[in-house]
Amino acid sequence: MNAETVRAIRLSKDMSQQDFADALRVSRQCVTAVECGYRAVSSNLRIKIAQTFGTGPDVMEAIERAKESSKLAL
């Protein structure tokens, strides 16, 4: 999972960075840093995203494929 994937998940849920951060119980600054590529997506953050939004490995792969094929409008 990378910065673009995190942003894609947030946008697919129609959430602001603050709403996304609140749902994950992290700071908005953490979300911003991850989305801008200043901070790596930690395994703990990956787990929180999966638990909060139900995004398993197959969903993550679908998001990655959609981005690569330009089917996901960011």
Image (cartoon, rainbow, N blue to C red):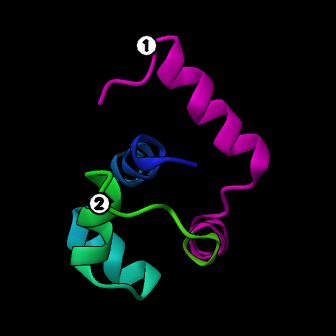
Badge 2: how crowded within 10 Å, few (<14), some, or many (20+)?
some
Residue 14: x %, y % from top left: 31, 52
Element type where label 2 sits in the image: loop
Q: Quadrant of residue 61?
A: top right
**Separation of disc 2 and disc 1 at Cα?**
21 Å
Residue 26: x %, y % from top left: 37, 85
Seen from this angle, which residue lies furthest top?
69
Badge 1: how crowded within 10 Å, few (<14), some, or many (20+)?
few
Identify residue type, mark 2.
Met
Element type where label 1 sits in the image: loop
Q: CB atoms at circles 2 and 1 under 8 Å apart?
A: no
Query: Is residue 48 placed above or below 70 in the rendered structure?
Result: below
Quadrant in which the C terminus is drawn:
top left
Q: Quadrant of residue 17?
A: bottom left
Identify residue type, mark 1.
Ser
Residue denoted by label 1: 70
Q: Determine the residue positioned at 65% across, 44% down.
A: 60
Q: Which residues are magenta?
A: 46-74
Q: Determine the residue positioned at 42% across, 24% down.
A: 72
Query: Is residue 45 placed above or below 71 in the rendered structure?
Result: below
Is 50 displayed left or right of 68 in the figure? right
Q: Determine the residue positioned at 22% across, 62% down.
A: 16
Residue 3: x %, y % from top left: 41, 48
Q: Nearer the viewer, residue 7 or 36?
A: 36
Seen from this angle, which residue lies furthest bottom?
25
Is 63 displayed left or right of 40 in the figure? right
Mark with earlier residue (2, 1): 2
Residue denoted by label 2: 15
Q: Is residue 63 magenta?
A: yes
Q: Is residue 60 magenta?
A: yes
Residue 20: x %, y % from top left: 34, 70
Q: Residue 48 has which mark?
A: none
